[in-house]
Image (tube, rainbow, N blue to C red):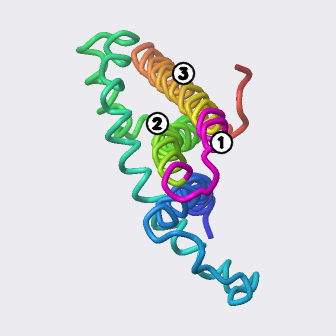
């Protein structure tokens, strides 16, 4: 398997792992949990059941995260590059000028970006499904409020961290593209080494 394929699989797995949690909570919120018999599942059978679900959910959440990040992707590009230059940067990615090093830097930045934006969706979905499960399925009214409160706070903090990381990574992507554009304008030949430079 090529490195790009491995990277894509890992991205989907990381995002899908979080999506599986809120999907499982959503299922239990609707169907309840008393029908589950742990003796019917072994570790291998459970893994074979969860992996395809996680992979499919990871792809779906990635698409949702892309749509969500698109709401502030344009303003960040215009702020960092200017409107005219932002359009040029988008087309620059497809030009032959990009060296293997440039492509590697962009791919690495975008892999982290896809994970961060996917976890914005996961965290927000977790807030909804966790509270639904706690208030509609868990017995004991006295223990529901603390669980809902601290669970929601933790998920919202994760959503905030993912949002800030997404904005930061979008800005970093703009800086990479800006550097490539300036090198191309100055006639500097593209880098050919594959080692990461200092940041």
Q: Badge 2 local density, few (<14 within 10 Å), some, or many (20+)?
A: many
Look at the numbered disc 1 and give the secondary structure of its residue.
helix
Question: Majority secondary structure of the magenta segment?
Answer: helix
The residue indicated by pointer 3 is 168
Q: Residue at x 54, y 66 (%)?
A: 54
The residue indicated by pointer 2 is 98
The numbered mark, 2 or 3, whose residue comes first in the sequence reads: 2
The numbered mark, 3 or 1, whose residue comes first in the sequence reads: 1
Q: Residue at x 23, y 15 (%)?
A: 84
In front of the other: 182 or 189: 182
Tell me which segment is drawn in magenta.
134-150
Q: Is residue 101 visible?
A: no
Q: CA distance from mark 1 to mark 2?
A: 60 Å
Q: Residue at x 43, y 65 (%)?
A: 30
- 136 horizontally vs 44: left or right: left
- 160 horizontally vs 62: left or right: right
Look at the numbered disc 2 and give the secondary structure of its residue.
loop
């Amino acid at each position: 398997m090529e490195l790009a394929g491995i990277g894509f699989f890992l991205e989907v797995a990381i995002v899908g792992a979080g999506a599986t949690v809120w999907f499982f909570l959503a299922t239990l919120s609707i169907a309840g949990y008393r029908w589950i018999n742990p003796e019917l599942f072994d570790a291998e059978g459970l893994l074979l059941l969860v992996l395809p679900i996680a992979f499919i959910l990871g792809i779906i959440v990635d698409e949702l995260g892309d749509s969500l990040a698109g709401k502030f992707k344009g303003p960040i590009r215009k702020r960092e590059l200017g409107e005219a230059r932002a359009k040029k940067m988008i087309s620059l990615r497809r030009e032959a000028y990009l060296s293997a090093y440039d492509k590697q830097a962009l791919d690495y930045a975008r892999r982290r970006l896809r994970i961060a934006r996917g976890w914005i969706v996961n965290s927000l979905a977790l807030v909804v499904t966790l509270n639904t499960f706690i208030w509609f399925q868990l017995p004991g009214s006295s223990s529901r409020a603390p669980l809902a409160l601290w669970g929601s706070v933790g998920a919202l903090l994760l959503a905030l961290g993912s949002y800030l990381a997404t904005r930061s990574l979008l800005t970093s992507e703009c800086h990479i593209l800006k550097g490539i554009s300036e090198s191309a304008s100055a006639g500097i030949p593209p880098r050919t080494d594959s080692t990461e430079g200092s940041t």
